[in-house]
Image: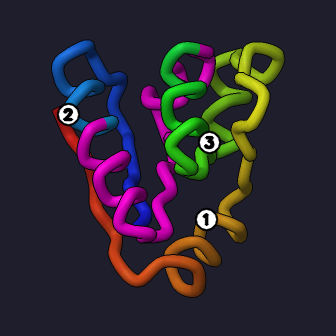
C-alpha cells in the first residue's frame, strides 16, 4: 500500500496514520508513505520518521516539493527523495493499493 500525504499532519491524524500503517506492516503488507506538498515538513521530524522506519514502513518525499520549501538539508536520514518519474513508478509498479490521506 502506498499512502500519499499532501497536507501537514497534526498529532491526532499523525497517530491515526501511524497506527494504520503499522498494523498493515505487521500483516507483511508492503507499506510506504509518500510525502508531497506541505506534508514534506513531516519528513523533517526525526520522531515521526523513526516511528515509521521502526515499523518497516518506507518513507518517501517528493524532491521538487522539498526544494520549494527549503527543506533539503532538514530531511531525516532514512527518507528517500523521489522525482516525478519515480513517483509514477511507485504508483504503477511497486504498490497494489493507493491511499490519499487527508486531515
Total marks placed: 3
Q: Under tag 3, what secondary structure?
A: strand
Q: Under tag 1, what secondary structure?
A: helix
- Residue name at image x 78 percent, y 28 percent: 77
Q: Compared with residue 98, is residue 61 higher up or lower down, i.e. above or below?
A: above
Provide the residue designation for mark 3.
61
Q: Which mark is residue 16?
A: 2
- Contact, mark 1 vs mark 2 (Cβ under 8 Å): no
- Contact, mark 3 vs mark 1 (Cβ under 8 Å): no
Q: Position of residue 55 (x, y in %)?
A: 50, 43
- Is residue 56 rendered to the left or right of residue 77? left
Q: CA distance from mark 1 to mark 2?
A: 24 Å
Q: Compared with residue 58, is residue 90 higher up or lower down, i.e. above or below?
A: below
Q: Position of residue 32 (x, y in %)?
A: 51, 56
Name which of mark 1 and mark 2 comes first in the sequence. Answer: 2
Start-end of magenta stretch: 19-46
Amino acid at each position: 500500500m502506498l499512502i500519499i500525504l499532501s497536507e501537514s499532519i497534526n498529532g491526532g491524524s499523525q497517530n491515526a496514520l501511524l497506527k494504520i500503517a503499522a498494523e498493515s506492516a505487521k500483516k507483511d503488507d508492503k507499506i510506504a508513505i509518500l510525502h508531497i506538498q506541505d506534508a514534506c515538513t513531516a519528513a523533517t521530524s526525526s520522531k515521526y520518521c523513526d516511528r515509521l522506519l521502526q515499523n518497516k514502513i518506507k518513507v518517501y518525499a517528493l524532491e521538487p516539493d522539498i526544494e520549494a520549501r527549503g527543506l533539503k538539508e532538514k530531511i531525516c536520514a532514512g527518507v528517500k527523495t523521489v522525482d516525478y518519474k519515480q513517483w509514477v513508478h511507485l504508483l504503477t509498479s511497486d504498490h497494489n493499493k493507493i491511499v490519499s490521506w487527508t486531515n
